[in-house]
Amino acid sequence: MRQLFFSVIFLFILIQNVFGQEKESHLFQDPRRYIDTAVTYMNQEKYLEADKYFMVALDKITVLSADFCYYFGKNSYNLKYYSQSIDWLSKYLELKGSSGQYSDEVIALLDKSEKEFRANRATGTAGTIETNTKFFYQNTIKCSVDDHIICPVCKGDDIITTKDRLGENIYRACPYSTNGVLTCEQYNLLLQGKLKPKK
């Protein structure tokens, strides 16, 4: 009887370990865990650690969320990976336009990233960061000569409206569109994070 009791206990422990490992393995594969960990590190200003987790998550995700683009772009900016930051912040605007939850901050960060990138390129200190292009070409479109597309950044208004700290509206011209539209070629460059702002 005693031997049967210990056998049942052993079997119970064995089953719990197997199911526990399966559950842990499943959670380990969930890219959201990596993204959450990356955001936690980013909020603690541990940007290099955050970048490692973002890169693992990027390999695991199959559907690109706008929030991921925002977080990864912001972390890249903090690491001074300006080209990578421009890519991902532009992707956020492509997905959300100027009315997304983080659009105002993204537009401001994008402006700073572009200025820093140009300044570094002018002084010859712009490094090249290999960015993961997994999601950057799936949404590009085939172009005809005269195709024009409504700019996803300003949504065709040619003006971007943001608010200052007092809640007052600030208006500025869209840095990408002409009369609220882009050529097809410009649109594809925007999707790839390669469209340079107007001078």
Image (cartoon, helix red, strand yellow):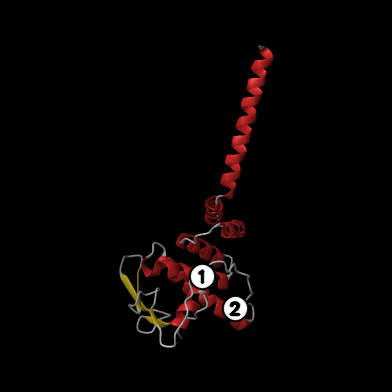
Indicate the quadrant where residue 5 lies.
top right
Residue that label 2 marks: 120
In the figure, is residue 189 to the left or right of 157?
right
Q: Quadrant of residue 82?
A: bottom right
Residue at image x 63%, y 27%? 13
Residue toward you, 104 or 2:
2
Q: Look at the image and tell me in which quarter the N terminus lies.
A: top right
Say what amino acid the circle numbered 2 marks: Asn
Instruction: Kindly give the residue lying farthest to the top in the view shown.
Output: 1
Q: Which residue is mark 1?
A: 138
Residue type, numbered disc 1: Gln
Q: Position of residue 26 (x, y in %)?
A: 57, 45
Distance in Å between CA atoms under marks 2 and 1: 30 Å
The kind of secondary structure element at disc 2 is helix
Residue 107 x %, y %: 43, 71
Q: Residue furthest right?
A: 3
Tell whether 93 sits left or right of 115.
Answer: left
